[in-house]
Image (cartoon, rainbow, N blue to C red):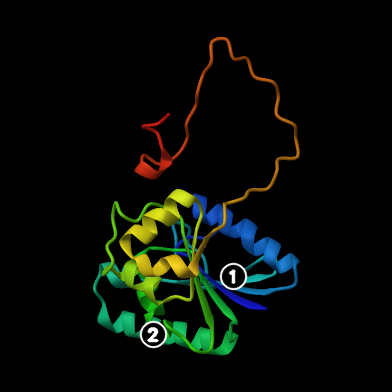
């Protein structure tokens, strides 16, 4: 199967979605799938096209075009994305981003020739509505995945039409090779790492 993996950030930029995306695409390739990755240019200055572990990574200046409201650049980028999709001929487009860069994918959604899947990684009701760019994207794709039951329930609360074409697939990480050492719990201590965002649950911690 040929999979076009659409994400805002990708390795070597570091974020939760970038790390999970690297691990997911690596395993998909090992299982015999052909992968191409589309992402924005990140913090590091990298070429528009690079290769990582045999996977082609295509980076576009999505953010700068949108921030600068550069209509000429937007038109050019839309054409470049269309050409990439046409030449790669994916069976599936897997959207792993809620960032404005998905604007450049809108001309392909919905599509009769390719299946489109979107994975939701956070609580939408805090920032997005049914008629937002991301809300309209979820409405148009073929299948929606939530990385937890709470996240999927939240997405369905915004648009109930998602319910009958959605499922939960939990995030997974590679198991560390080293056994964790025994930790003292007298007194107990809790360390929480993550963004200060509601879905991280720091209030509960």
Determine crowd level at label 1: few under 14, some 14-19, many 20+ residues with C-alpha closer than 10 A: few
Horizontal relation, residue 156 to residue 18: left or right: left
Say which of 88 and 149 sits in front. Answer: 149
Q: Secondary structure at mark 1?
A: strand
Decide if residue 89 is on the left or right side of residue 180.
left
> According to the image, label 1 marks what residue?
50
Residue in the picture at 57% in, 59% down: 21
Kindly indicate the quadrant of the structure image that contains residue 199: top left
| Total number of numbered discs in the rendering | 2
Of the pair 157 and 87, the residue shown nearer to us: 157
Q: Nearer the viewer, mark 2 or mark 1?
A: 2
Q: Which image quarter: residue 152?
A: bottom left
Q: Quadrant of the N terminus?
A: bottom right
Which sits in the foreground, 43 or 166? 166
Residue 71 at least partly seen:
yes
Residue 102 x, y percent position in the rendering: 39, 72
Residue toward you, 81 or 189: 189
Q: Which mark is residue 107?
A: 2
Q: Residue drawn 42% across and 83% down?
A: 110
**Considering the numbered disc 2 on the image, is that residue within a helix, a strand or a loop?**
helix
Please tell me which residue is depicted at 33% across the width and 65% down the height of the picture.
159
User: Is residue 167 depicted above or below 184 in this figure?
Assistant: below
Query: Could you tell me residue 14's position as x and y percent?
Result: 51, 51
Q: Is residue 131 left or right of residue 30?
A: left
> Residue 77, percent across and down?
39, 81
Query: Does residue 13 appear in the picture of this structure?
Result: no
């Amino acid at each position: 199967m040929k999979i076009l993996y659409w994400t805002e950030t990708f390795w070597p930029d570091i974020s939760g979605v970038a790390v999970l995306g690297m691990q997911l695409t690596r395993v998909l390739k090992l299982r015999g799938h052909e992968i191409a990755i589309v992402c924005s240019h990140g913090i590091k200055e990298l070429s528009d096209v690079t290769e990582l572990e045999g996977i082609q990574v295509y980076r576009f200046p999505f953010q700068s075009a949108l921030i600068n409201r550069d209509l000429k650049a937007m038109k050019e980028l839309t054409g470049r994305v269309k050409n990439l999709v046409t030449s790669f001929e994916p069976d599936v487009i897997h959207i792993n981003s809620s960032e404005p860069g998905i604007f450049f994918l809108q001309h392909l959604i919905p599509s009769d020739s390719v299946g489109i899947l979107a994975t939701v990684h956070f609580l939408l009701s805090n920032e997005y509505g049914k008629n937002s760019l991301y809300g309209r994207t979820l409405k148009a794709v073929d299948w929606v995945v939530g990385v937890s039951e709470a996240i999927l329930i939240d997405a369905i609360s915004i648009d109930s039409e998602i319910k009958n074409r959605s499922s939960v697939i939990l995030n997974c990480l590679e198991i560390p090779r080293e056994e964790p050492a025994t930790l003292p719990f007298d007194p107990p201590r809790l360390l929480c790492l993550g963004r200060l965002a509601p879905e991280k649950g720091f209030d509960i911690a």
